Amino acid sequence: MQIDLCRNLARAILTLFLVVCFATCNHSESPNVLQIDFPQPAPQQKLLFTARLNNRTSLFTVNRDGSGQKRLTDSTLSVGWRPLWSPDGRQILFSGWQDRHVDVYVIDFDGRNLQNLTPDSLEGDHPRWSPGGDEIVFESNRKIWVMNRDGTNRRNLMPEKTRTGANPDWSPDGKWIVYDTSLEIRTMSRFGLEDSVRSTGSLDFRAIQPNWSPGGEYISYRSVGQIDDALAIIDLEQDTTFFAQGIFPSQGVLGWHPAGHKMLIFSGRNRGNPVEIAWLDISGNRDLIIEPSGAWATCADDCETIFYVDTDPETNRQEIFSITDGQISQVTRNFLHEEVLDVSPFILP
């Protein structure tokens, strides 16, 4: 009897072993097998740009090879200066004019879910994402405001200050905001505290459009005079300001190199000098990239590739080009619209 019990126990163990092996090995028959989901390839990096159509500036995206051009906004809304990708690449932030009112808008990367974040009497212009993408700084009626990325928790950082503020930008760590008063470049905390002067203009030269460097050591800005312009660079550690003369930065700094040691600039327009896109290092040395007919440029691939606007020699129309190691490629060709002006490219981060 004891032998039979042992045999039955052995059969039970063998049966259980076979069941486990069958369930593990026969993947096609078992609904509970572990499935391995291979990651999907990342979407192709897109170029964001604006183009004026019938006196309205619209927002477009296009693949870097020129395919997949898509218009994101319609003719009821005119897109403002310098639209920006969110840090995660899912949304686009911009100011827009509608019914003679300027507001801050966001739209998904595919053109869906257009939202006005300042729909009431509060106007909004020159918006900028915080480094983490959770907040937006913007100017309204010459005051600096901050709000959550969905438009909630709006707060005026200058409620009791008599001076005005414009063109705000975040520090790389998201703790500070730089802005201009037309005569001064100032910084303050993201809560509006510790407001201090960083550089001063004059009655002859306005100090405008500050931009923080990626490492946080420098702030660049335009010094604009009636006759001459200059690009100024504030060294925050040394508390000094350097002026790069003869640059004529008609669009300010188009972007900083990720390493933080040089800036992409557009220079020369309306000053009798050749229009040029160039790198300018923090010592004022200029490295010419190209002399185009357009007025904008941006960089990608750690700034190994520059996208810029120039004239298509065959159609005499403005299109987007790229240059990498001196090799030029045309990105867009023959827009589907009758009039395309002021094309401005902005690369996906």
Image (cartoon, grey):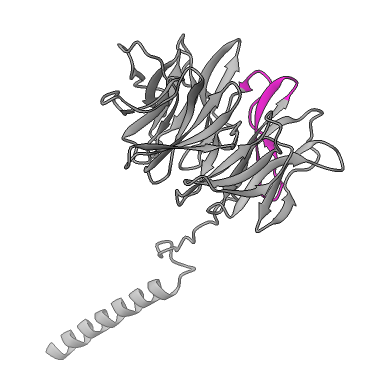
Horizontal and vertical percent position of residue 326? 69, 57
Horizontal and vertical percent position of residue 263? 52, 44
In the picture provided, is 136 more to the left or to the right than 321?
Answer: left
Vertical relation: 311 (above or below) 223? below
Task: Report the magenta residues as a range.
Answer: 53-78
In the picture provided, is 23 more to the left or to the right than 250?
Answer: left
Q: What's the residue at 33%, 16% (across, down)?
A: 158
Residue 95 occupies which quadrant of the picture? Answer: top right
Horizontal and vertical percent position of residue 165? 41, 19
Q: Number of marks in the image?
A: 0
Residue 166 occupies which quadrant of the picture? Answer: top left
Q: What's the residue at 45%, 16% (across, down)?
A: 140
Residue 327: tell me if it is visible. yes
Residue at far bottom of view: 3
Q: Quadrant of the N terminus?
A: bottom left
Horizontal and vertical percent position of residue 80? 59, 24
In the picture provided, is 287 more to the left or to the right than 141?
Answer: right
Q: Nearer the viewer, residue 345 or 285?
A: 285
Q: Tell whether position 317 is magenta.
A: no
Q: Tell whether position 76 is magenta.
A: yes
Q: What's the residue at 49%, 22% (across, down)?
A: 206
Residue at far right of view: 314
In the picture provided, is 321 more to the left or to the right than 300?
Answer: right
Residue 345: tell me if it is visible. no
Residue 137 occupies which quadrant of the picture? Answer: top left
Vertical relation: 80 (above or below) 61? above
Vertical relation: 231 (above or below) 9? above
Q: Nearer the viewer, residue 49 or 189?
A: 189
